[in-house]
C-alpha cells in the first residue's frame, strides 16, 4: 500500500515540476517597423547550454546589464545607483560564480557607477573598460580607487574594437572613436561607451546615456558590414583586441537598450530606423523624478511599431538568445 502511494506521490511531483517549466515569449528577428512580439510556450531543454542570457537588472533609476555567454563567461555593463546590483546579481548568477570576466563603465555618472564599487569588492573582476574621462563624483573616484587598490586590469576605450568570446559571441565597442582620457567634458552622457553584442544571427545594442549627437555620429560612420576577427577570450583573460574600422560598424540590432533611460534627448527617429530593433528596453526607476521614459520617445516607438519593455513596469527583464532567435522569459 505504501509503495503504491509513494509511486503516486512521485508521479504527481514529476508532473508538478513539468508544469513549472519555463515559458518564453518568442521575439521574431527582422525589421522592427512591422514586427509584433508573438508568444511561444516552452523550449527544448537540450539547447539551454547554447543560450546567451541578457539581464536588464532592476536597480532603480539607473543602468545595469548582466550578460551570461554560452561559454559561461560573465559581462557586467554599469552597476546602477546603489548596492541593489548585488542582490540582482545574486539572483541571476550561479551561487558559486564569484568572477566577472568583463566589467564596463559606460560613463561616470553615479546612476551607472555607484553599484560597481561594491561589485569590485565582492567579485573577482578580470578586465575593466572605461573612457578615462575626468569626473569628480565621489562614487566614481571610489571606483577608481578600488581598481588601483586591487591593481586590476583597466583599459581605455578610445577607438572601435571588438572582443571574441568564442561560441560565436562577440562584443563590439562602437563608440567612443576618440580619446576622452583625462579630458573635462561638459556633457558626460555623450562620452558613453556604446556596445553591440552579437551571438550568431542575433544582436543587442547598448547605448549607455548617449544622446542625439552620438546617435547621429553613429549613423554617419556605420554601414551594413559585420566586423570579423579571429581573436578569442580564453581562460577568462583578454590579451588581444581587434580594431574595427568605420566601414565595419554595424547598427542593425534585434534589441536596443535606449540611450539615457528613454529621455527626450535620445532615440531620434532616424537612429531607431537605422537600428530597426524588434524590441526596445528602457532602464528607468519607478516614478522617477525625470519623467523617464519621455512621452515623445514612447510615441515615436509606437509610431514605428517597436515593442518596448521597461524596468519600472516589468522589474528585471531577461532576454535569451539561442543564436538564431531571441526570447523573453515570462
Image (cartoon, rainbow, N blue to C red):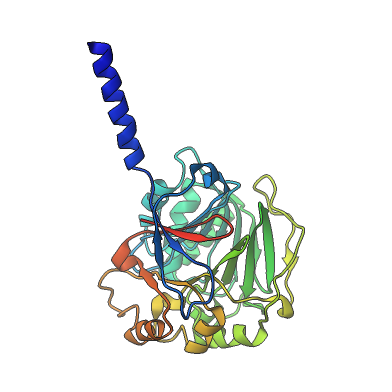
Looking at the image, which is closer to me, 211 or 275? 275
Q: Residue at x 46, y 49 (%)?
A: 43
Q: In which quadrant is the C terminus drawn?
A: bottom left
Quadrant showing the N terminus: top left
Name which quarter of the figure residue 61 lies in: bottom left
User: 114 above or below 13?
Assistant: below
Whether residue 269 is visible here, answered yes or no, is yes
Frontmost residue, 208 versus 122: 208
Q: Is there any visible trace of residue 83 in the rendered image?
A: no
Q: Is residue 234 above or below residue 15?
A: below
Q: Is residue 163 above or below residue 131?
A: above
Q: Residue at x 47, y 76 (%)?
A: 209
Q: How many marks?
A: 0
Name which quarter of the figure residue 300 lies in.
bottom left
Q: Name the spot of residue 251 as percent of width and height, x first.
A: 60, 76
Where in the figure is residue 103, as x and y percent of width and height?
55, 58
Front position in the image: 1 or 174? 1
Up the image or down, 183 lies above or below 243; here it is below
- Residue at the image position 24 percent from the left and 17 percent from the top: 5
Q: Is residue 117 left or right of residue 8?
A: right
Q: Position of residue 270 (x, y in %)?
A: 52, 88
64 sits to left or right of 325? left
Residue 11 falls in image quadrant: top left
Task: Provide residue 31's location: percent of width, then percent of height.
Answer: 53, 77
Amino acid at each position: 500500500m505504501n509503495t503504491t502511494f509513494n509511486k503516486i506521490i512521485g508521479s504527481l511531483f514529476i508532473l508538478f515540476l513539468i508544469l513549472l517549466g519555463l515559458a518564453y515569449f518568442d521575439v521574431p528577428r527582422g525589421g522592427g517597423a512591422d514586427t509584433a512580439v508573438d508568444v511561444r510556450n516552452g523550449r527544448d531543454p537540450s539547447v539551454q547550454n547554447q543560450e546567451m542570457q541578457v539581464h536588464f537588472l532592476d536597480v532603480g533609476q539607473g543602468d545595469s546589464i548582466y550578460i551570461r555567454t554560452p561559454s559561461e563567461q560573465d559581462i557586467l555593463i554599469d552597476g546602477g545607483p546603489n548596492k541593489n546590483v548585488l542582490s540582482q546579481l545574486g539572483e541571476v548568477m550561479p551561487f558559486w560564480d564569484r568572477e566577472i570576466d568583463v566589467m564596463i563603465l559606460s560613463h561616470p555618472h553615479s546612476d551607472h557607477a555607484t553599484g560597481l564599487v561594491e561589485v569590485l569588492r565582492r567579485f573577482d573582476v578580470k578586465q575593466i573598460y572605461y573612457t578615462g574621462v575626468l569626473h569628480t563624483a565621489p562614487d566614481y573616484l571610489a571606483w577608481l580607487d578600488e581598481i588601483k587598490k586591487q591593481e586590476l586590469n583597466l583599459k581605455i576605450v578610445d577607438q572601435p574594437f571588438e572582443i571574441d568570446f568564442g561560441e560565436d559571441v562577440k562584443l563590439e565597442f562602437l563608440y567612443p572613436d576618440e580619446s576622452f582620457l583625462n579630458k573635462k567634458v561638459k556633457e558626460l552622457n555623450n562620452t558613453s561607451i556604446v556596445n553591440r553584442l552579437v551571438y550568431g544571427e542575433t544582436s543587442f545594442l547598448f547605448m549607455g546615456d548617449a544622446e542625439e549627437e552620438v546617435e547621429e555620429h553613429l549613423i554617419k560612420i556605420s554601414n551594413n558590414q559585420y566586423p570579423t576577427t579571429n581573436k578569442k577570450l580564453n581562460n577568462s583573460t583578454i590579451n588581444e583586441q581587434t580594431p574595427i574600422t568605420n566601414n565595419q560598424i554595424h547598427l542593425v540590432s534585434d534589441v536596443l537598450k535606449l540611450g539615457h533611460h528613454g529621455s527626450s534627448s535620445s532615440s531620434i527617429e532616424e537612429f531607431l530606423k537605422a537600428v530597426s530593433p524588434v524590441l526596445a528596453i528602457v532602464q528607468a526607476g519607478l516614478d522617477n523624478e525625470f519623467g523617464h521614459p519621455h512621452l515623445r520617445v514612447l510615441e515615436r516607438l509606437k509610431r514605428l511599431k517597436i515593442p518596448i519593455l521597461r524596468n519600472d513596469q516589468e522589474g528585471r527583464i531577461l532576454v535569451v538568445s539561442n543564436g538564431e532567435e531571441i526570447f523573453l522569459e515570462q
